[in-house]
Amino acid sequence: MNSVSLASSNNKNHLFAPLHINSQYSVLEGASKISQLIEAAKDNQWPALAITDKGNMYGALELYTKARAAGIQPILGTTLAMTEGDITDKKTRKPSYDIVLLAQNMTGWRHLCQLLTTAHLDGFYYRPRINWELLENYAEGLVCLTSGVHGPLAHAILRGDSAEAFERAARLKTLFPERLWLELQDHGRDSERLVTQHVLEIANRLDLPTVITNDSHFTKPEHTEAHDILQCLQQGKTMAEFIQRPNAYGREFYLKSRSELETQFAFLQDPHLVARCLDATLDVADCCKLELPLGQTLLPDYPLPASESAESYLRQIVQRFSNEKYAGASLRHLEQVQHRLDFELGIINQMGFPTYFLIVWDFIDYARRQGIPVGPGRGSAAGSLVAYVLGITNIDPLEHNLLFERFLNPERISMPDIDIDFCIDRREEVIQYVTERYGQDRVCQIATYGTLAARAALKAVARVKEIPFADSDKWAKLIPATPGIKLKDALEEGQPLRALYDTDDLVRRVVDLALGVEGLTFNVGVHAAGVVISKDPLSSIIPLQRAKEGGIVSQLTMGDLEQLGLLKMDFLGLRNLTIIHNTLTLVEKAGQTPPKIDHLPLEDADVYQMLTRAETDGVFQLESGGMKALVRDLKPSVFEDINALVALFRPGPLNSGMVKQFVDRKHGREQVRYDHPALEPILEATYGTIVYQEQIMQIAQQLAGYSLGQADLLRRAMGKKKADVMAKERDGFMAGALKNGVDEAIASRLFDAMTEFAAYCFNRSHSAAYAMVAYQTAYLKVHYPVEYLSALLSSVSSDLDKIQLYIQTAQAM
């Protein structure tokens, strides 16, 4: 799209680009989802589309990726408040007006990021603000539109100061040569027509182009009331209160087409002028050629010793810690370790990630040196021997048969994703260390966007409509409490809400309005664990703002940051690590020698006896009612059983019959069979049942000749179950299996079984790491019950139900 000049198109008279849109990311002021905007652009054959949300670029990456995928040019911008004078002056409220800024190129993107960051961090006063000085400093690379009745020209015109309006226009022309358009808007207000006449005069005097836009806040006229609902939620008003004041946004603030705007501006009585102003939308679009560099890697610089590269230094410290970790191991085992380390380091270097490992090792090493408890691992990273010897994880992947390729795979290029659990009380110390290490301006937390889910949307509409809470609560409870449930799902035939919807006009009205606001952004929060670390000042890459709690957060979500190549880490707080640490401290205070928690014997009979009795209150991952029932049925007798418990206790396995098969086979009620001898070493620990994703990978490797990297791609494809992809994968698997001498019928049956189990299989690396924490808590509960229960009770001091439960547990013991 960007290679085509929109302004010179032969079909120019039929084209148009909407340039002034408040999407749902203008929180509680916009009701248009990005997907709705793109669908409208496709329906109307608009070649380009801009979003100009107020004071933010929350939706920038979503628009950029989705619009480009649809063949539509995305234009990224924002609407910023401008004030005369010092933006930090909070004592005197200066007059302010809006200005629309669009990114012309990467310089413009960086300048928008800087302007937004400064507006939020330094200029926030009711709204984020900039001033003329900031605009002068960051005008390069930006296209400027003067907005409507809230813009700098209209602000002066409506005060009767036409001279000031002219001066502002002249000043903007100097700042944005060939990149300034004076905006004309008409939503049926008398003030807008007055402004339009004056703006046209200024345009003639200064030889400036004019452009017609519509200040869109929702996509279709029928969305007007849904938008009013959002306004009520924003202002804390009922609809009755809202309609008593002059309505800020009426029916005309929808996403209008070119023909509708031609009709709207017929009052100018100059069709050629109107056509020229609508054609100008394409000139603006043609001016905005932003290409975001997605897919790059922007790792911060790790401070290296002199004459060392990241590759050589990583190998050096890996070798040092490996020698310490495996001191006293047999020669054969050392050879196995070295072979695995060489393989992993080769892949890490090939994929360009040695710096990533050094960064993660550095802050985890700091945490361990400071006595901050760190979890044994989380996710697929536990499959890396390099991570284990560096102390990033604390579970030996060789001992637990964990696969590196499930973590890093050169055939599936993506940034490593090492999430770390820390003691919940001291997690902030690690974040502070990282901030000091790389710079305050290079580290921040990550924004999240809260949206109105099905039940919340229905209750919000009912509240605004002043419907009694008892009624709305009763209706909302007819929506299944299933994660991700949509109102349309609850309105399917046979659903209880559908029956009420069909017979009660009030319910139908409320639900129809709720459908209009469902899924819209309701608030902006902070990710519980996400931290982004940058090589360069973040404000030159992404827009930042201040969280309600006071910290600095990105305006982009975790997924957006990954697309831009920024390093994001999850610094998670795990209460159980704190409990373990406090238990060991109490043991030591009692004059005993605390156990080496990372080197416990995994065959302790007393631990398995307690688990067999399902006395798992206070045991990590194993204390819910449903899990207790599974523990009681399974009667775990080895560590592998605990590993499997973590993987199996999920809706998919529980509802599929997979769990029953596993339990019955363990206890001999069902015979364990292997369709092929090569399956036995892979599935023996899980009684012939495919429980882990890694087992699917190993089956493909052993029976069909896949590399583990190829097998990981197969595993992912099986999980997605796309028919065309699966047909191709079946052909490849069958060919490989037949080449290895596997019977065709067995290979076909095995592929079907792998496909079925792939939907439910779990990541063995994550399961093993969390099973280790479960075992550690069970071990402490059995052997140090007083200290463990004391630490456990202290950790839930604000939860009366948990306190009562654990007191009962203590009494029972």
Image (tube, rainbow, N blue to C red):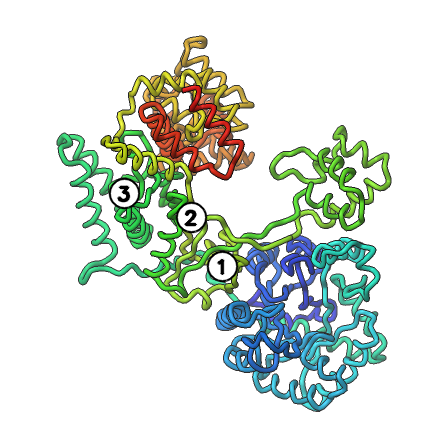
Question: Residue tagged by mark 3?
Answer: 391
Question: Residue tagged by mark 1?
Answer: 553
The mark tally for this picture is 3
Seen as rendered, the residue at the extreme top is: 669
Residue found at x 34% / y 61%: 436
Question: Residue tagged by mark 2?
Answer: 570
Residue in the foreground of this view, choosing between 68 and 480 = 480
Left or right of residue 577, residue 210 in this image: right
Look at the image and tell me in which quarter the C terminus lies: top left
- Residue 261 x/y as whole percent: 79, 69
- Residue 180 x/y as whole percent: 62, 80
How packed mark 2 is, by other alpha carbons closer than 10 Å (few <14, some 14-19, many 20 or more), is some
Q: Quadrant of residue 116?
A: bottom right
Residue found at x 50% / y 31%: 802
- Residue 688 x/y as whole percent: 40, 18
Residue found at x 72% / y 80%: 154
Q: Is 502 situated above or below 126? A: above
Residue in the foreground of this view, choosing between 477 and 138 = 477
Q: Secondary structure at mark 3?
A: loop
Q: Is 507 situated above or below 222? A: above
